[in-house]
Amino acid sequence: MNREELKNILPHREPMLLVDKCEVDGEYVNSEYTIPADAWFLQGHFPGYPVVPGVILCEIMAQCSVLLIPVEKLKTNTALYGGLDNIKFKNSVFPGDTVTVRAHLTDVRWPLFNVDAEARVNGKLCVKGTLKFYLVPKENLKGIQ
């Protein structure tokens, strides 16, 4: 799936859509995202040494991971964070790097699910951990008017 196809599944939009392409392979999902040199999250983080914030790396993994949920469930629900466990940061990520994510479901108890994910750059592990999500019915979400 490319970015336009992903927009039919994920609720995220620019500048918060952090997946360029994705493939679901059985019980695994694999995705890529290339960090733009002018990314909003690099502004001021850090002057002279732009490094991708850890929370953004977790979000990149999360957006990929949500694609493991059956599409029919995502049509009427939104996946929200329920927690992050055992997150380990191993290497920094910089502008121009392509982050590859591989994730798989480890526990499903609808509406809760857990995913083990890892993000790499050029095969080198950057972050790994367990992401927890809750599926919340879209009608229960209140938008800002």
Image (tube, rainbow, N blue to C red):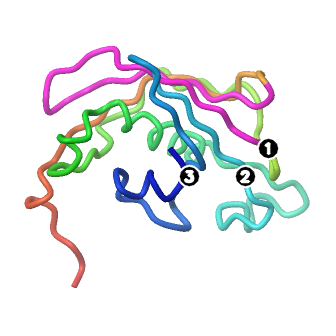
x then y, percent, for residue 64 = 47, 38
Which residue is under mark 1? 97
Residue drawn 18% across the image and 49% down it: 77
Q: How many marks?
A: 3
The amino acid pointed to by label 2 is Ile
Q: Residue furthest left?
A: 139
In the picture of the structure, the residue carrying the numbered disc 3 is 18
Q: Earlier in the sequence, mark 3 or mark 2?
A: 3
Report the residue at 79% width, 58% height from top: 46
Residue 27 higher or lower than 18, as above or below: above
Above or below residue 76? Residue 141 is below
Label placed on residue 112? none
Q: Is residue 98 above or below residue 28?
A: below
- Locate residue 18 relative to residue 121 in the image: left or right: left
Residue 127 or residue 98, whichever sits in front: 98
Residue nearest the observer in this picture, 34 or 58: 34
The CA distance from mark 1 to mark 3 is 13 Å
Who comes first in sequence, dot 1 or dot 3? 3
**Distance from Cα at disc 1 to Cα at disc 2:** 6 Å
Circles 1, 2 touching at the beta carbon (< 8 Å): yes
Taking the image as shown, residue 67 lies to the left or right of residue 107, namely right
Quickly name the residue at label 2: 35
Q: Quadrant of the C terminus?
A: bottom left
**Magenta residues?**
97-122
